[in-house]
Amino acid sequence: MRRPPGNGETASRGISGWGLWGRHEPRRLCCAGPDRHGQALLQVGVNMMALPGGRHLDSVPLPGQRLHLMQVDSVQRWMEDLKLMTECECMCVLQAKPISLEEDAQGDLILAGGPGPGDPLQLLLKRGWVISTELRRIGQKLAQERWARVHSMSVRLTCHARSMVSEYSAVSRNSSQEMGQIEKLLMEKCSELSAVTERCLQVENEHVLTSMKACVSETLSTLGQHFGQLLELALTQEVQALVRKIDASDNIHTTESTTGNLFSLTQEGAPLCRIIAREGGVVALFKVCRQDSFRCLYPQALRTLASICCVEEGVHQLEKVDGVLCLADILTDDSHSEATRAEAAAVVAQVTSPHLPFTQHLSSFPESMEEIVTALVKLCQEASSGEVFLLASAALANITFLDTMACEMLLQLNAIRVLLEACGDKQRVDTPYTRDQIVTILANMSVLEQCASDIVQENGVQLIMGMLSEKPRSGTPAEVAACERVQQKAAVTLARLSRDPDVAREAVRLSCMSRLIELCRSPSERNSSDAVLVACLAALRRLAGVCPEGLQDSDFQQLVQPRLVDSFLLCSNMEESFV
């Protein structure tokens, strides 16, 4: 759940430590309550004309309104005369003039109302997002040396910081002495920033401004550090309260509401997930998953656990409480609902992800691996929806990276037949993301010699051939990337399986060589992906070694005979245009 860094570099040092979210782009904050595919967003008001009580500026009587009414005849006459007295030069200037003097004036952040009474979490998240964004913007204006804008934004930042401190003090349960000290340091730095930026407005000497810029930059960096410390302390205090509430509650509605709040916090990024893991959130959630009276809350608790385990601290806590054993018990217990087992599969997929280095050292996983793999294959076979199949197959795909013994287990469990049969069921396999998981499993299993015969028997070569033609439906970047992965892994699988002459001959009979040549020579067919190109060249060379007669002379001389790097350069240069 990491956010891309914000635009605009600053001249200050240590600037990347600003706030809990650093220089990330503005957060989209979610309300309490679980939602797998989306989040309700906290809307930030940008209506500069709004007034307290829901009134607007145009509804407030102005002092000059009576005078304006008395002079309506003169004004009307002037407007009529104006039509005949227009100066072209003035009109050109007016048409080219922007409404706002600052291009980002409309981006000034104003909270639309405030958080509900007694809702410290949402208050912290709202104010935290606004202040983090203001810090980032001030850094951008400082780099551009736009001193008037830097000063006005510094004043506004001070107001936001003061509001956060006072509002949170009013609703918080108790504030520690450490928080009080950091609040004092934060407000002192805010005042210092406003004062020094005001002095910069009165300086015209470039050398003096350069030295003052360094001072502003240092003040801004220190302010950001104090803000981050204060926000982390406050959020830690709120997370502790939520975890204690889950631990102590025996009421299903209270536990459901509190778990929903915890899940919402996990969607705010890795820093909050670390806080939750550190403060016992993983332990409390597994406690819920071990109580029969809370069975209906298992899916929600497991979904929250999967989010927390995206950070190393979450996985370590899972190991400490024998979380893998608990997941295995849930997956192998048919009395649990499909939704519960699917969410348990999601946690397994998260803690075995090959993209996270700390998941490679799960000491407790090998003990339960056979039970988990067996249960996941069964879940794939019985899945009633594409989402359930995706979660189960993703867990299997990740496990095949974690331990090579898993591939042998899958072979014994006839997983190839289960996966290939599912490819023909649109209800279970309907997206490139799901096919990405399937072809990953096949690619990792294809290192086993006995895998080739099973794939030929189940018409797997034809399905792999179809994956070489994977195309995105929507054209979104995520879907395009998934299609590239499917094509690449399909080519890798074909290259590995073609060690078996029977597989190679079947691939040639199905015109796989023609498709591989097309992918090599046509960048648009592979979305100009170098990874797909390398995999296709390797597969083509493997097939050509078994059936060279299937190639034309030009294809052989350009794609097979040269060194792989030379063929790669030849094909990658085909997309260059000198127009």
Image (tube, rainbow, N blue to C red):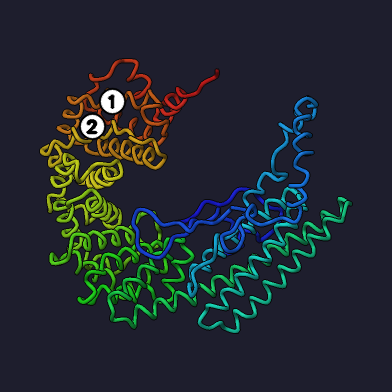
Q: Is residue 101 left or right of residue 260?
A: right
Q: What residue sits right under mark 1 in the picture? A: 515
Assess whether mark 2 and mark 1 are in contact (beta carbons under 8 angstroms). Answer: yes
Determine crowd level at label 1: few under 14, some 14-19, many 20+ residues with C-alpha closer than 10 A: some
Residue 4 x %, y %: 52, 51
Residue 97 x %, y %: 73, 36
Q: Is residue 326 left or right of residue 262?
A: left
Q: Earlier in the sequence, mark 1 or mark 2?
A: 2
User: In the picture, residue 292 is in which quadrant?
Assistant: bottom left
The extreme right residue here reads 205
Residue 300 x %, y %: 30, 65
Quadrant in the picture for the C terminus: top right
User: Up-down: is 443 above or below 520?
Assistant: below
Q: Residue at x 15, y 40 (%)?
A: 455
Quadrant in the picture for the N terminus: bottom left
The extreme left residue here reads 457
Q: What residue sits right under mark 2 in the picture? A: 465
Q: How many marks?
A: 2
User: Up-down: is 254 above or below 219?
Assistant: below
